[in-house]
Structures are given as structure tokens and as C-alpha cells.
Image (cartoon, rainbow, N blue to C red):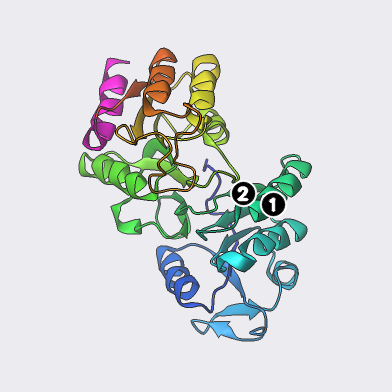
């Protein structure tokens, strides 16, 4: 069983003829992801890498190839419309890598997403993507993560930070521990999936035996996740919260990583998670060992 992506995923890449889209599409192909189409307006009829058909619209790509997921590398001014085009075409999964999408554009996307009532999932924007590690034809990588650090296994990872996702994965793999699925939900203030959405999937997945949750200052997503962990999770969860030294009112890295109105501090998030039964690693280098310590005691 896979979480979000796997052998049944048929992917298209929006912006496949751009430098970033083309580079990462090639990496996904080489990993074994079923890349069935690309989309760039005005470039329909071309072939990417000599084999992947390129279409002018998402609707054309879905009709011709049966694609059920998309990865978006469209520049910020057009990225929200690219997401909406994926929704309109009936795609089950939309993963938006683009950073810097205006918040007002994402509010429009969010309203449409909520109206779909679970018929589609959005990951991102401003995220590294999703990977279910595995051999070609089994594993699936959608996004920009370095595939070579991942190893198939039973630990789920969900994170607001792309870099810290790679750090957690690298630690696990170095210890010989593989991952079931890694989900980068992104660091923007308005987006798609949040921690609870990912935790629900990991809780229901029999191949996920434990979870690393990586949060940061700003917003209340980690506190909501803590409530879910307390009420619904029976699998061990280890966390890390970035930004413990950030001053109030100062944005640190991600657009959503800001303490405002005295809310969203690292201390509040750590207290909530630990009160829910999760353990929070004191430093980024302790993420994997913190979870494995919990699992060994269990």
C-alpha cells in the first residue's frame, strides 16, 4: 500500500519544457515514475526526451493519456491558474513546486479546493513534492527531492521544510531505516494538505509504522496536528520545530514562518506536541534517533 503516490500514479508535468521543469521531469523519469505527459501552451505535439508527449492543455493531456496527477513548475504569476486547470481536468493529485505565488491567488485556489470536497488533493505550493521510495515500477518520485538518499521502508515523513525533510531522510537511511512515503507540505501560509491530512494517511497505512513530523514557527498547524495525534494516532510520532530562536514579527525563511500576535511560537508548538504524546527532538540532528528510541521502547 502506498500513501498519495505509487505504481498506479500516472503523472504529467506542467511547465515541462522550462529549465526547472525539464530538469526535474528527467530525474523523475530516471527514478521510474510513470511520466505520461507534459504540458506547455504552444508546445503541443513535441516529445520530451523523445518519448513523453507534450500537450497545450491539461485537459488534452488527461484525455489522451489518462494522467491522474500533475507536478507544477509554472512561474508564480501563472501557477495558481495551473493548479485550477488541474482541478478542472479532474486530477486526483496536484503537486505545486512553485515558490512565491501571491497569497490572494492561493486564497482563490483554496476556495475551489474546499468546494471539491475531497475529490482532489493539493500538495504545496512552495514544496519539494512527494516520494514513495522503491524500485522502478513500484516507487514514485514527484518533485525535486534527491532520490538517492531515500530507502524503502516503514517510516512516514511530513514536513513544512524541504531541507529538513532531506535531513530526516538522510539520518534514517544512514541508520538503515527506510521510509514509506515522504510528504513536503510546503511553507506558505495558504496551501493544500496540512499535517492532519498527512497523519490521517499514515495512520491508515499498514506499511507506515512511525512518523517524523517537522514543523516551524508561524500558524497553528502543529497545534492542530498535536490534537489529532492525541485523539487518533496509535503510531509513534517524533517531531522537530524549526525557529526556536526567531524573534516575534520577523519572518524566518518561509512566508508562513512568522510569529504574529504572540501566536505560533516554537515553545507553544513543542508543548502541544509533547502533551499529545509525541517526542520533540532537541536539535535537527536528533530527529531519526528520537523516533527510533520511541519505537524501541514500544
CB-based contact (under 8 Å), mark 2 and mark 1: yes
Q: Which mark is residue 122?
A: 2
- Tell me: residue 265, above or below residue 33: above
Q: Nearer the viewer, residue 251 or 222?
A: 251
The quarter in which the C terminus is drawn is top left
Q: Of residues 274 and 158, which is closer to you in this image?
A: 274
- Whether 93 is drawn above or below 57: the answer is above
Apparent side of residue 125 relative to residue 120 in the rendered image (left or right) = left
Compared across the picture, whether 225 is left or right of 149 comes to: right
Check disc 2: other Cα within 10 Å, few if <14, some if 14-19, many if 20+: many
Q: Position of residue 201 (x, y in %)?
A: 55, 34
What segment carries the magenta color?
283-298
Q: Is residue 134 above or below residue 249?
A: below
Quarter of the view holding residue 258: top left
Q: Position of residue 133 (x, y in %)?
A: 40, 50
Magenta segment, prevailing SS (helix, strand or loop): helix
Q: Can residue 265 be seen by looking at this rendering?
A: yes
Q: In the rendered view, does 278 fall on the left or right side of 107?
A: left
The residue at 66%/55% (across/down) is 105
The residue that label 1 is drawn on is 109
**Count the marks: how many?**
2
Q: Secondary structure at mark 1?
A: helix
Task: Work out whether residue 151 can be spotted.
Answer: no
| Residue at image coords 55%, 43% | 189
Q: Residue at x 44, y 68 (%)?
A: 24
In the image, residue 51 lies at what x, y percent? 54, 81
The residue carrying pointer 1 sits among few (fewer than 14), some (14 to 19) or many (20 or more) residues within 10 Å by Cα, namely many
Residue 164 x, y percent position in the rendering: 33, 44
Q: Which mark is residue 167?
A: none
Reply yes or no: does residue 117 show up in magenta. no
Does label 2 or label 1 sit earlier along the sequence?
1
Amino acid at each position: 500500500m502506498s500513501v498519495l503516490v505509487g505504481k498506479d500514479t500516472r503523472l504529467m508535468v506542467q511547465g515541462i519544457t522550462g529549465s526547472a521543469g525539464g530538469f526535474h521531469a528527467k530525474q523523475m523519469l530516471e527514478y521510474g515514475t510513470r511520466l505520461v505527459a507534459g504540458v506547455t501552451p504552444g508546445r503541443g505535439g513535441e516529445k520530451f526526451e523523445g518519448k513523453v508527449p507534450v500537450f497545450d492543455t491539461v485537459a488534452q493531456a488527461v484525455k489522451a493519456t489518462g494522467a491522474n496527477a500533475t507536478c507544477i513548475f509554472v512561474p508564480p504569476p501563472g501557477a495558481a491558474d495551473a493548479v485550477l486547470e488541474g482541478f478542472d481536468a479532474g486530477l486526483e493529485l496536484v503537486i505545486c513546486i512553485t515558490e512565491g505565488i501571491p497569497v490572494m491567488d492561493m486564497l482563490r485556489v483554496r476556495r475551489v479546493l474546499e468546494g471539491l470536497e475531497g475529490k482532489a488533493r493539493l500538495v504545496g505550493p512552495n514544496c519539494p513534492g512527494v516520494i514513495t521510495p522503491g524500485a522502478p515500477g513500484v516507487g514514485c518520485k514527484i518533485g525535486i527531492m534527491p532520490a538517492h538518499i531515500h530507502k524503502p521502508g516503514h517510516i512516514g515523513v511530513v514536513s513544512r521544510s524541504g531541507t529538513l525533510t532531506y535531513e530526516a531522510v538522510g539520518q534514517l537511511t544512514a541508520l538503515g531505516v527506510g521510509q514509506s512515503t515522504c510528504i513536503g507540505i510546503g511553507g506558505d501560509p495558504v496551501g493544500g494538505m496540512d499535517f492532519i491530512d498527512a497523519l490521517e494517511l499514515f495512520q491508515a497505512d499498514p506499511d507506515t509504522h512511525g512518523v517524523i513530523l517537522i514543523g516551524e514557527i508561524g500558524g497553528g498547524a502543529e497545534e492542530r496536528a498535536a490534537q489529532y495525534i492525541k485523539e487518533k494516532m496509535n503510531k509513534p510520532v517524533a517531531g522537530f520545530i524549526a525557529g526556536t530562536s526567531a524573534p516575534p514579527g520577523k519572518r524566518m525563511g518561509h512566508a508562513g514562518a512568522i510569529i504574529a500576535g504572540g501566536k505560533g511560537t516554537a515553545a507553544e508548538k513543542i508543548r502541544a506536541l509533547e502533551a499529545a504524546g509525541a517526542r520533540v527532538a532537541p536539535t535537527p540532528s536528533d530527529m531519526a534517533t528520537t523516533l527510533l528510541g520511541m519505537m524501541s521502547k514500544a
